[in-house]
Image: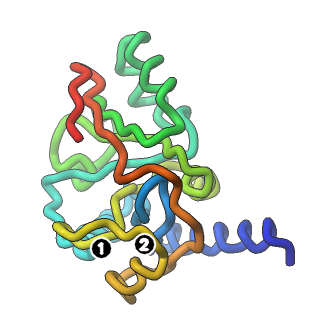
Amino acid sequence: MSADEQSDDLLRRAVDVLRSGGVVAHATEGVWGLACDPFDAVAVDRVLDIKGRDADKGLIVAAGRPEAFANELESLDDEVASRVRASWPGAVTWVVPNRRFPPWITGGRDTVAIRVPGHEQARALADLFGGTLVSTSANRSGVEPARTAQAVADALGEAVDFILPGEIGSSTGPSRIIDALNGRTLR
């Protein structure tokens, strides 16, 4: 089996886990992340439990391409939507008006945080899944995010259903978060 075939097989295994309500750890631009189906309340609750995170903080949603966020981007004026699209793929998350994500994703707000990662494997995972994925750092709240697969295994162990082999990119940390409506940097 070639390296590409092995990589494709591992991506398919990760997608099978996601579709069955599981939680997958995977590499992103600067840290390891946790992914699950954002429309599966039980899976999202598991991610929150793994992290020890309050649901009212909300979660970021990632996709493999900007078109996956067409509903959200059409609520923005053309200039702002163009600026958002131009930043992707990349380590930039935008807070935009929510059009379809459930309250367990938004923390009950009328906005949602969205991104298209600048990490090829993270985009491929979302594309193969066929939609958006929760995107949050692989760590317990208050602890530094994992930067290796081994760090994920050591910190989160059996709580994660599958660790997708991969390498983080060259970013130095989590994505920058910007409010699309006022341009303010939130993180």
Q: Please, is residue 180 above or below residue 169 in the view?
A: above
- Residue located beneath label 1 in the image: 46
Left or right of 134 on screen, residue 116: right
Residue 139 point in image, percent of width and height: 29, 70
Q: Quadrant of residue 73?
A: top left
Residue 90 point in image, percent of width and height: 49, 39
**Residue drawn at the location 39% of the way across and 30% of the way down:** 72
Crowd class of label 2 (few under 14; some 14 to 19; many from 20; radius 10 Å): many
- Residue located beneath label 2 in the image: 23
Residue 186 point in image, percent of width and height: 20, 36
Q: Please, is residue 56 above or below residue 116 in the view?
A: below
Crowd class of label 1 (few under 14; some 14 to 19; many from 20; radius 10 Å): some
Task: Give yes or no for contact between labels 1 and 2 (Cβ–Cβ under 8 Å).
Answer: yes
Q: Nearer the viewer, residue 182 or 146?
A: 146
**Residue drawn at the location 37% of the way across and 70% of the way down:** 146
Which quarter of the rendered picture does the N terminus lie within?
bottom right
